[in-house]
Amino acid sequence: MNSIKIPFAPISKPMEASAGKTGLWRFLRPEIDVQRCIKCGICWMYCPDAVIVLDEEGVPHIDYEYCKGCGICANECPVKAIKMVREEGKP
Ligand code: SF4
Ligand code: SF4
């Protein structure tokens, strides 16, 4: 599958949304398998809190300070490179 070329444009930066810092209460955590990732940028486009940034090579990185664990990124990833895992110590 060909990856979509998205011009590097740092228009989206992780920031504190209405949910505030989520590290303490989030119970699911998205983890990206970079070997599987095709660098399409879809997770970056869909994250409602703009907590995913793409580096210069198009690899996505998640800011876990503000990620609320909604799972939209995992749901939208076309190659299932994002897995939602339970946070340690959470029911
Ligand atoms: S789980 Fe939700 S908030 Fe966290 S990176 Fe994915 S889409 Fe963004
Ligand atoms: S949606 Fe999936 S394949 Fe696309 S950049 Fe995000 S993790 Fe990589």
Image (cartoon, rainbow, N blue to C red):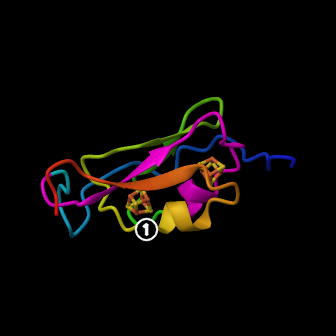
Residue 33 coordinates in the image, percent (x, y)? 56, 40
* Mark 1 secondary-structure assignment: loop
Tell how many labels.
1
Ligand 1 lies in quarter: bottom left
Nearest the camera: 8 or 40? 40
**Nearer to us in this view, 76 or 19:** 76
Residue at (43%, 68%) from the top-left corner?
48
Q: Residue at x 15, y 60 (%)?
A: 25
Let me know if residue 28 is in the magenta part.
yes
Question: Residue at position x 51%, y 44% from top?
Answer: 32
What x and y, as percent, mark residue 26?
Answer: 22, 60
Residue 7 x/y as whole percent: 72, 44
Identify the amino acid type marked 1. Answer: Pro
Q: Which residues fall within the magenta stretch?
A: 24-46
Drawn side of residue 18 relative to residue 2, left or right = left
Residue that carries the numbered disc 1 in the rendered image: 48
Residue 61 vertical placement versus 43 (above, below)? above
